[in-house]
Amino acid sequence: MKRGEGVFERIARLASDLPDGSEITQRMGRAGLAHDGLTPSNFAAVPTLSKGKLAAVQEVADGFGPVLPFGGLAEVSRIFRSPGGTYDFAGAGPDYWGFAAYVKAAGIGPDDIAIVALAYQGTPGAFMFDEGLQSVGATVIPTGTMGSEAVLSLIQDLRPTVFVGTPSHLIGLIRRHEETGANWQGTMRLRAALLAGERLTDDVRVFLAERGVASWQAYGTAEAGLIGYECDVHSGLHVRSDILVEICDPATGQPRPDGEAGEVVVTIPRKVYPMLRLGTGDVSAFAGGECPCGRVEKRLVGILGRTDELTKVRGMFIHPRDIAVLAAEVRQAKRLWVEVHRDADGDDVRIVVEPMIDPHESGLFESVEQLFRQRCGLRGRVVVVPQGTGKDGALVRDMRSK
């Protein structure tokens, strides 16, 4: 990045340096644009790239080359695998994912100790927070997906001040501690929670605030890293200052006026894994007016839904293709689908099975939860419905708004 250079100037400079075979160059060519021909007035002519199409690009011969145009895998420090068949890449250097702005906005610094209770296996979420925390000098305890008893023991022993994870996990830890008769606020130092993977409701904020824990949320993806984050006013998500975010019509890719809902389309001018007009599939809108905190970046009102068939749960996506494979693996199931419900503790993932035989006789449904977790990276619980009651329908059914 050149000193004082704006976001669009960096986007145009990166585009002019791209080789002919890059995925971005090919899309620019379909819009009739040369390498050095990108301007604010013609930017929206470049077709958006959806997450589904990104997976298809990577499936072709030498698929990593078009999306890693500046040095390929030689410039990559980590490779991640996302549900739905997409590989994601991280470069070396401090705060590659841009999470430092979020961490600073939450008032976290060198005196803090943070538990990161997100999965470090396969997906980048935990690394995003980990690197952002370390970039401001905080100490990280990488618990990952350790069991609740082990995490609670570490909280009691090491007295961290920050928790990173899902709302339901933190609520479960607090309730487990309070069931022993202990007072959470009187015995713990935890003062801030950077929550991810589930919707942060007002009830959760109040529950945590009553125990001395201020809750914060941000928005990011495995491809983009941080996109938006809350300030201390908690009024929308400030767009990261070094990227470009548009709200676009999902059908045409054309930007929509401020205040109107549309697909979040993000552009990231970086060398390792550049993104130009990536359609995230998330629906949002820009908030009106200025934020009282004084930041000048645009704000997203939050995530209002999804444009595609992916269902987002605890920061992960459940893809119908994965559930179809799971259903084929469970041969004793006449029908199998997944339902996502919301309860007081967060998202409740149910693997619904209509058996061909008595499940208690087969004894095989105990393995379904493990197979689901291996394929989708999420915990779910099997719910067996009586034979003859299952109905044909979607393989993934989001019941949270019903």
Image (cartoon, helix red, strand yellow):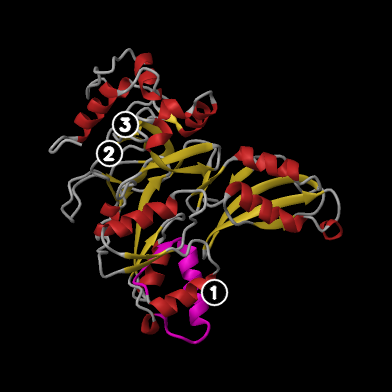
State which quadrant residue 50 falls in.
top left
Secondary structure of the residue carrying numbered label 2: loop
Magenta residues, start to end: 160-184
Along the line of sight, which residue is nearer the eye, 18 or 201?
18
Between marks 2 and 1 in the image, the one whose residue lies nearer the viewer: 1
- Which residue is denoted by mark 3 in the rendering? 256
Along the line of sight, which residue is nearer the eye, 234 or 136?
136
Along the line of sight, which residue is nearer the eye, 328 or 265?
328
User: On the picture, is 128 further left or further right than 323?
Assistant: left
Which kind of residue does numbered mark 3 sit on? Arg
- How far is mark 3 from mark 1, CA to CA? 48 Å
Which kind of residue does numbered mark 1 sit on? Glu
Question: Which mark is drawn over residue 149?
Answer: 1
Secondary structure of the residue carrying numbered label 3: loop
Q: Is residue 391 visible?
A: no
Between marks 2 and 3 in the image, the one whose residue lies nearer the viewer: 2
- Which residue is denoted by mark 2 in the rendering? 243
Mark 1 Cα-neighbour bin, 10 Å: few <14, some 14–19, many ≥20? few
- How far is mark 2 from mark 3, CA to CA? 18 Å
Residue at the farthest left position:
4
Q: Is residue 228 visible?
A: yes
Residue depicted at 37% across the width and 56% down the height: 129
Along the line of sight, which residue is nearer the eye, 133 or 190?
133
Magenta span includes 84? no
- Is 68 placed above or below 77 here? above
Between marks 3 and 1 in the image, the one whose residue lies nearer the viewer: 1
Q: Are marks 2 and 1 in contact (CB under 8 Å)?
A: no
Which kind of residue does numbered mark 2 sit on? Ile
